[in-house]
Image: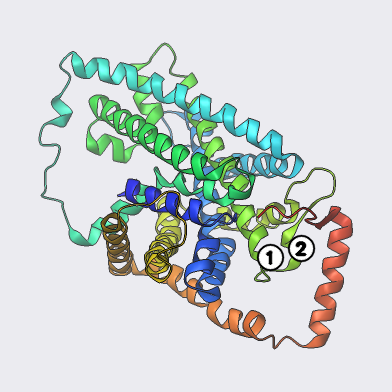
Amino acid sequence: MFPSGALCYAELGTTFKKSGGHYTYLLETLGPLPAFLRLWTEFIFIRPAVATYVSLAFGQYVVEPLFMPCAAPTVLVKIVSMLAITFVVAVNCWSVSMAARTQMLLTFIKMFALILIIVPGIMALVNGKTENFQNAFDSESLSLTKLPLAFYSGLYAYGGWFYLNFITEEVINPNRTIPLAIIVSMVTVTLFYVTVNVAYYTMMTANELLMSEAVAVTFASRALQGVAPAIPVLVALSCLGALNGGFFGTPRMFFVGAREGHFPAIFSMIHIRRQTPLPAVLFLYPLVIVMMARGEIFQLINFASFSRWFFIALATLGMIIHRYRFPDLPRPFKVPIAVAVIFTIVCFFIVGLSLYSDPWNTGGSCALTLSGVPVYYLTIKKSYIPERWKKAFNNLSLHLQILLEVAQQEVKTY
């Protein structure tokens, strides 16, 4: 499923040259209200939830080995997770090039960790250790209502294919780079993630895998005794890379939204010396900390995934409508229309069914999404904010601008 979405976003990224990803594509194809709602949900809960469960995974892998075979203290896991968030925010506020170099380093570490897991697992499989694959697709527990939540958890691992679209204006030759990067990364990620799961199941049963708080730690204790202590560290650094990638790309969406007048102007400002979108990065930090204090990984995945996949489906629907309305518009990369239609239908189906599967988390996500509608009509479409409030807000923005040393972008990049 995810390759179809990735190819759709390759077309969108080469058709619209602005940064901003989902927000920009919804704005250009379906109009300002869906675009604002995407911006609203990303800031209020999608990005804080995503950052929270990635950082909690980081904390789990750092702390779990220190307390095995006992359970790791939840408070300590969350403290370590907060330190990871603080580090990533600091790097992305300090320097764009440092954040990019950090991302490259952590990506290489992630690939090394995956290879370290894959090799012994595949070797054991070749040597005949296949008992855990007997009746691997047993359908006794198969349920249609569980399908959306399974999709949400599974597709999260493959969900980084749209991050490049957040920074289109910073990409050299996007018409070539975006499709090439998406296709190469799509093949690489699929190959590595499928084989790493095969390796896991070679050494662990399905029940053992589900019961493990840190799967790679359990795997390493059985297959890699000599280097077992290194595995959780490598996986934790991999989580740090995912966290850094999110904080590198998502603030560009807020930056573009503010530039279009859909968010406070301070979000469209960059540091006068470091050229980082400092306000957009910094203002996410307290929301992530608050959500981390109350969140649990799988609940957060379901909570964030409903709106995330709803808007991805809207973006690909918008692509189909835009292609019909403007057939002569240059599109350097075109995905087959059947692929886009099937992907869109499947996304809407999964999103709709998830309301039945997990009404509490997905219903809350839906309600928070719809809460942006009155905000849009009261503050963006036609402002009903009292002049006194506007004056106070502008005064606060001015003081924040001075304090953070930020200013509006001077060079047009789109």
* Residues at discs 2 and 1 in contact (Cβ within 8 Å): yes
Q: Identity of the amino acid at label 2?
A: Ile
Outermost residue on the front side: it is 328
The amino acid type found where label 1 is placed reads Ala
Tell me the element at label 1: helix
* Residue beneath the point at 48% across and 68% down: 29
Q: Quadrant of the C terminus?
A: bottom right
Q: Is residue 102 left or right of residue 63?
A: right
Way the structure is coloured: rainbow
**Residue 239 showing in the rendered view:** yes
Q: Residue at x 34, y 22 (%)?
A: 118
Number of on-image labels: 2
Q: Earlier in the sequence, mark 2 or mark 1?
A: 1
> Looking at the picture, does residue 57 appear above or below residue 281?
above
Instruction: Provide residue 90's location: percent of width, then percent of height.
Output: 72, 42
How far from the left and from the top, in percent, is residue 148?
29, 58
Residue holding disc 2: 266
Q: Which mark is residue 258?
A: 1
As displayed, is residue 305 above or below residue 36? above
Q: Quadrant of residue 243?
A: top right
Q: Can you name the residue that lies furthest to the top here?
A: 226
Q: Residue 310: image x %, image y %? A: 40, 65
Residue 74 appears in the picture as rendered? no
Of 69 and 325, which appears nearest the observer? 325
28 above or below 21?
below
Give the class, few, some or many, for how many residues have Cα within 10 Å of label 1's Cα (few <14, many ≥20).
Answer: some
- Quarter of the image holding residue 17? bottom right
Q: Whole-Å distance between the Cαs marked 2 and 1?
A: 7 Å
Question: Residue at image x 49%, y 51%?
Answer: 14
Q: Secondary structure at mark 2?
A: helix
Residue neighbourhood size for the residue with mark 2, other residues' Cα within 10 Å, grouped as few (<14), some (14–19), many (≥20): many
